[in-house]
């Protein structure tokens, strides 16, 4: 297929032809969404959460620590952290300041220390030491918003109550024109409307992996991307299809 780097329209064959014709183009067409999901399944068949954990509480802690950090960095910190404080009760007994040195390298360590200790105390005092298994109760834990709750519910409890919207999903959903919104709650609503519920958890993991491997923030590796000919992102680095203004992170 002819490369149209910089953006000349290229009308391909079959279903792609329909999507590339500007006046009929609907980025949310069920066939296009299903095509995206199938390509992600082929590229990332078995992906799961990259944060090391062995129970729901450890996943809560790791997810809180992952804000504004990387999973690699968090995974460097948590083995020693969980060796030092093996149970949620151990965390609940701490003062936040006692945790700061252990998690300093993940950034925002003062707030994260308050969140982790606060969450531990709530789990112990309100939920008998067990991480709650539903969105409403999870959201009562300090430092836990929908993103963390969705990670814990989807990854540990196998419950799809929403779609995780982290920085990768925010960026890639916009590039793929699956949303025009900027607010994570609205992005989540948009994705929940078009992705089948049984795919919510896997889709979240697949897009996070895609964001790490190929669709990185700066200079995405479009030439290697399995979604290339159905992606019209304005900030693509290589393209065989027209780019759409506004389709960017
Ligand atoms: S083609 Fe480029 S911008 Fe589009 S999803 Fe792939 S890597 Fe991201």
Image (cartoon, rainbow, N blue to C red):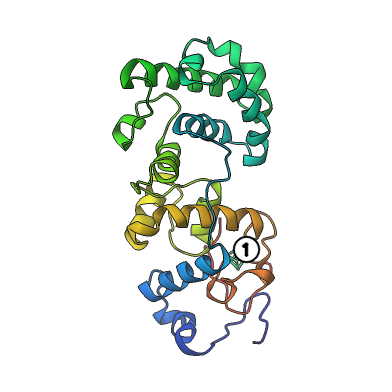
Name above or below for residue 7 compared with residue 197: below
Q: Position of residue 13 (x, y in %)?
A: 51, 90
Q: Residue at x 57, y 36 (%)?
A: 66
Q: Secondary structure at mark 1?
A: loop
Is residue 91 or residue 235 the one in the foreground?
A: 91
Is residue 99 or residue 244 the one in the foreground?
A: 99
Quadrant of residue 145 within the rendered picture: top left
Quadrant of residue 215 within the rendered picture: bottom right
Q: Residue at x 35, y 46 (%)?
A: 159
Location of the N terminus by quadrant is bottom right
Is residue 183 or residue 194 the one in the foreground?
A: 194
Name above or below for residue 9 compared with residue 149: below
Q: How busy is the neighbourhood of tag 1: few (under 14 within 10 Å), some, or many (20 plus)?
A: many
User: Is 72 left or right of 126, judged from the image as shown?
Assistant: right
Q: Position of residue 109 (x, y in %)?
A: 61, 23
Quadrant location of ligand 1? Answer: bottom right
Name above or below for residue 248 compared with residue 140: below
Q: Position of residue 158 (x, y in %)?
A: 38, 46
Q: Residue at x 56, y 18 (%)?
A: 85
The residue pinned by badge 1 equals 235
Quadrant of residue 229 within the rendered picture: bottom right
User: Is 190 left or right of 248, judged from the image as shown?
Assistant: left
Q: Is mark 1 within 8 Å of ligand 1?
A: yes
Location of the C terminus by quadrant is bottom right
How many marks on residues? 1
User: Is 204 left or right of 229, judged from the image as shown?
Assistant: left
């Amino acid at each position: 297929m002819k490369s149209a780097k910089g953006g000349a329209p290229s009308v391909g064959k079959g279903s792609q032809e329909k999507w590339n014709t500007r006046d009929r183009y609907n980025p949310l067409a069920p066939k296009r969404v299903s095509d995206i999901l199938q390509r992600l399944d082929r590229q990332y068949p078995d992906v799961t959460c990259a944060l090391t954990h062995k129970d729901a509480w450890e996943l809560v802690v790791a997810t809180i620590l992952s804000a504004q950090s990387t999973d690699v960095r968090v995974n460097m910190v948590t083995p020693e952290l969980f060796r030092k404080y093996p149970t949620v009760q151990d965390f609940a007994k701490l003062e936040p300041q006692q945790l700061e040195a252990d998690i300093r390298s993940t950034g925002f360590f003062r707030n994260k220390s308050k969140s982790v200790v606060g969450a531990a105390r709530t789990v112990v005092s309100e939920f008998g030491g067990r991480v709650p298994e539903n969105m409403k109760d999870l959201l009562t834990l300090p430092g836990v918003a929908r993103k963390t709750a969705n990670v814990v519910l989807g990854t540990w409890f196998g419950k799809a109550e929403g779609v995780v919207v982290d920085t990768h999903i925010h960026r890639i959903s916009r590039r793929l024109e699956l949303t025009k919104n900027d607010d994570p709650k609205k992005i989540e609503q948009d994705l929940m409307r078009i992705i089948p519920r049984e795919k919510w958890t896997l889709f979240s993991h697949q897009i996070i992996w895609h964001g790490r491997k190929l669709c990185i923030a700066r200079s995405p590796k479009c030439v290697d991307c399995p979604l290339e000919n159905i992606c019209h992102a304005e900030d693509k680095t290589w393209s065989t299809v027209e780019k759409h203004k506004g389709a960017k992170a």
